[in-house]
Image (tube, coloured by chain):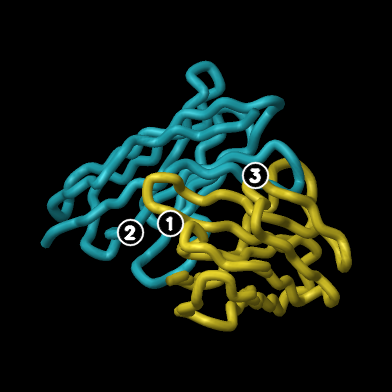
Chain colours: A yellow, B cyan
Amino acid sequence: DVKVTQSSRYLVKRTGEKVFLECVQDMDHENMFWYRQDPGLGLRLIYFSYDVKMKEKGDIPEGYSVSREKKERFSLILESASTNQTSMYLCASSPPRQGTGGSPLHFGNGTRLTVT
Amino acid sequence: GNSVTQMEGPVTLSEEAFLTINCTYTATGYPSLFWYVQYPGEGLQLLLKATKADDKGSNKGFEATYRKETTSFHLEKGSVQVSDSAVYFCALSTNDYKLSFGAGTTVTVRA
């Protein structure tokens, strides 16, 4: 089974701190994603990457950046954390699409970040 | 752009009841459709998918049929169990990389 591991389950940070959320996958997947999950809003895509050192903005990239130096690792960075970034953050990975239909995403268990 | 609308919850049912969660979509292009499930304390996992019109995805007793004419992908299960208590997300993809998710529907099944 694919395993996507997020380094922290719970995290509490202060406003203005720089925050790193780490994600590692063990299935050699090309594509990796960062979503945030908020009640009533579902999942919203922050950034994604389809190759090492490549990144693309998702729907809500403001206030975030990412790093993908190795294929298995995709980091989300909050340059200066704010209280409106309090949320559940989900990392996911997927292989390239083969044939018709999108490739399913494999998710980590999430990091619940609280910014005070 | 792409968007997914699913029925608001929460939904509370008794064991062995019939479950339906409505999902409609708007998409540019010809999407693939998915249902994901999130059990308490866990990440999302794929429940089922359909890639073309009239396809039926099924898994763990759940079914959903891709209806292009009504742009819908409703999730159904004939007899739910307590273990089906979870949050269910409808999603679509029109390219290789990105999924668009609905807001999620919380389902609670009581014994």
* Callout 3: chain: A
Residue at 47% across, 62% down: A83
Name the residue nearer the viewer: A76 or B42: A76
Query: Is A87 on the left-hand or right-hand side of B1?
Result: left
Which one is earlier in the sequence, the residue at label 1 or at label 2?
1
In the depicted structure, whether residue A56 falls above or below residue A25? above
Which residue lies most toward the front here? A16
- Image: A15 above or below B80: below
**Residue B37 image label:** 1
In the rendering, which numbered label is found on residue B86?
Answer: 2
- Residue B109 position, x and y percent, is 19, 56
Q: Residue at x 85, y 75 (%)?
A: A69
Amino acid type, mark 1? Val
Question: Badge 3 is on which residue?
Answer: A59
Q: Quadrant of residue A10?
A: bottom left
The amino acid type, in three-letter code, at marker 3 is Asp
Q: Is residue B5 left or right of residue A60?
A: left
Query: Could you say whether the residue bearing mark 1 is in a helix, strand or loop?
Result: strand
Q: Give the residue type that dot 2 points to.
A: Ala
